[in-house]
Amino acid sequence: MPEAHSSEQENADLIRRLSRVLLCRKGSEWVPIPPWARSFMIIGGGTASIYQAPGRSVVAFILPTRAYATPLLAAGIVVERARMLAQRVRSQKRFDGLWSLPDGNGVYIFQGSLRFKGIIKSHETDGCRRLRIQIDRNRNGGGTEYIIKPDQAHHLQPADRNFNLPRCQKGDKIDPPELLGAVLEHANLVPGQWYSSLECLIVGKAGLIEEEAKLPIALGSLTGRQLEGRLSDLVLPRRVEGEKAIYRSDILPMSIDEEELPLLTHDTLVVMNGAAAFIEKAHHWPDHDLIILLSPQDPSFTDAVEKLNGWYRRSEGSFELPQLSALPERIEAMTFLERRSDD
Amino acid sequence: MTELQEIQLVYDIHAACQVKAHNVGEPLVADFSLRLRKVLSSLNRDEAFTFLKPLRYYRYLLTASVLPVNHPQLYPTDTLKQLERQRKQVAASYPRMVADFDALIESLALLELHEQAPLLSHMNEIAGEASALSRAILIREAPHLPLVQETLKQYWRGLLPPEVVTLQRPKELRCFDHLFVAGPISDYPAHVLQAPRARHLDIVRYTWTQDEVRTGSLFVKPVLLPMEREVISIRSTGTELHELTFDLEELRPVVDVGSLAQQYGTHNHKEIVEARLVVLEGGSGVFLELGDTVFTANPALAEHDRIERVALASLAEGDYLILRTEGGGDLVAKVADGIMGKHAPILRQRQEEWKGRLREQVGRQGTGAVAHQLTSLGARYADATNIRHWMARRSLGPGTDGDFRTVLMFVGLGDSIDDYRQALQNLRKAHSKAGHEIRRRLIKQLGRSDMEPLEREGFMEVTLPEEHGGSLSIYRIASLPRQTARVSYKNIGRIIAIGG
């Protein structure tokens, strides 16, 4: 039986506890993930809420190797964001994002384990803000409609593209991500609806990152039974899980054209895996919080450090990220806040 | 698949690595270096004495070589004979130099008889003190790897000789107890020191090639301090010439990008492109156009990840660059032309038309002024770097439709926007397809090949059997001078000799 943990403090430490019970392979055995790997999950968890900062936050690291650091960091972000969603910590902000979409915008609406296509029919402000969502269309123009209030924001997901509504929908069956679900359940949190969102966008050599994300892991005593899977079961990248499954992050290749860039919400964290990714692609997201992982072995490493130092000099200065105390010894990190261009 | 536990070792070593700089005194080598400096300072500009060039290169090789100083691979035997033959001319043209010239001949002759390998002997002494489980010597000249391995069998006293590794090796996750670095640390990529792969990093260099070993923080304001790693400097017991120190720039082989650019340039402005010289292992080089992308091979990765297409700006020393063996030029464009078939000439002509007009404007007004005008017309990414990239013959054009429209209007092609957009779209499709196709063929071909020779010698040839394939050469990049040059487009991608 899972242990009961209910206090908010304990929930906030979910990543720390998860990192202690996460197992990886050593030969044919399952062993606890090593301290450096724990560090990156914890730091990922810490960066999950940097969007709260008044400006655009930048966190950069110089690592002796970038191997596996990015997917571990992303796992920390995705799990922590899932915890925050399950605790409704981000419902209001999420609703603000949905509210900014125009009438007619495509959305997905989640009911239990089913996902329906919908469009925003109207924005209503009768006492409180509500979104009216239409999910099918009958012959006389009417159809089934849902009213979504701010505290129900987790039932909705903006669609990447618009679509025509069918006359009748049975809904697509959604398989909830088992590993992430088990982590939240252990914290006595109800995940709510398993919609897809981009909590974190990873930019870099996609094939390599994808390969790293497929690292076999297992959850040890956290759930009372050993649950085996892959790191991607926590990171949930769209590139690995597929368009139709639940995803919470994505991996973007270096070769992607501007026209193909995904639409991000304001609070999506952008993780730059390597100096080349940072130098060549960071300009696409001038207002998003950035996490940059560099290694002295990266081509253009010196240029990337120079660029970051230049950014720092023009910034509003450092900010505190308590989780950085978990960094392995001698790892360099730098944080700073920049004015967002929309401030 | 690498295990997370293995990576823990990399972090542990990063935290605990001890750096020692051993300064080796060796009077014969130092004396030769000093004599050469004196002679070069007077005769270097005289073209009649270009035969001194191999001596410069020999001195450079000596700074980091663990081979015996008279090893045939290093020692310039012919040059000594030539020096003796030229003595008369020196006496006639530079009578005050004769004494220095004779001293140089004498010091070189002494080195010919000197069978010692000073840096290697010192490493041997240090290793004798340490009870290391795993040891390696990092050498700068990758092609010398088999020779060094052979030398170790003969010269290494005591326990098993250490492994010999080249620049490519420290990139991997493999770690050592002791890593001996041969020569000045600044001749190696920064990661050797900044991301060490050994608990003990011993830099073994001559006293006269001492360079600063920088281990401080790289970020201007790191979160956690202090970052500095202590470096212990150890002076060897050998004799030293205290007054002798060299700025390493003086020792390194000179690659004169400017004169090479003159040699490979043209007076026809339409044919001139901005390029960067890539110096390849073995004394050759290649000019690549700024903003270009190239194919690279990484023998350390699994078959399907081995081939990458990367931006020229992302290349680094030690990377393996794939080039066409014959005729230079752009492999992707060649394959793309095959894909486009009979439509290729007209699409290329359209491409050249707007680029030519843009180049003309830049030539007339300067990049800054053109960037300003394009921005005020609504272009989002029209800075100097991007405009240079758009003009480049081997780039396709602006990444956004909006910027491309703005450029077309700016160069007076606003009436035919749709034709040019369609052409760009077709070219993009063909180039993308060609890029994937070449990568697929290379993976197929290199997957079957033994890549050991590439790592060992820094060079190998591959033949792509299918149509538009041909012979390709893979070279390890020796250095990337920062200076850019204006060269003729027909010389882009062509392998050239650049000398020592």
Image (tube, coloured by chain):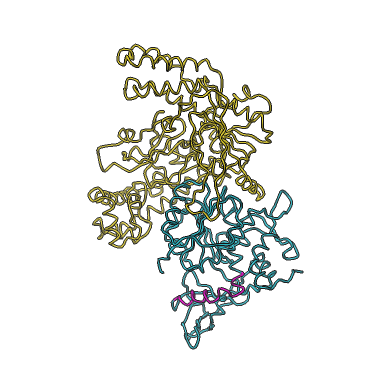
In depth, the one of A305 and A329 nearer the eye is A329
Quadrant location of residue B450? top right
- In the rendered image, the vertical position of residue B395 relative to residue B254, given as above or below: below
> Residue A95 lies in magenta, yes or no?
yes
Q: Can the viewer see residue A205? A: no
Query: Furthest-front residue in view?
Result: B242
Q: Which colour represents chain A?
A: cyan
Residue A240 x, y percent position in the rendering: 58, 59
The residue under the point 62% across, 27% down is: B124
- In the rendered image, the vertical position of residue A31 relative to residue B21, given as above or below: below
Total numbered circles:
0
In depth, the one of B413 and A282 nearer the eye is A282
- In the rendered image, the vertical position of residue A326 relative to residue B189, given as above or below: below
The residues colored magenta run A83-101
Residue B152 x, y percent position in the rendering: 61, 25
Tell me the quadrant of the picture where the N terminus of chain A can be found: bottom right
> Residue B360 lies in magenta, yes or no?
no
Residue B113 x, y percent position in the rendering: 52, 15
Q: Is B216 placed left or right of B157 in the picture?
A: left
Q: Which chain is yellow?
A: B
Residue A185 x, y percent position in the rendering: 68, 70
Magenta stretch, main secondary structure, is: helix
Query: Furthest-right residue in view?
Result: A1
Tell me the quadrant of the picture where the C terminus of chain A can be found: bottom left
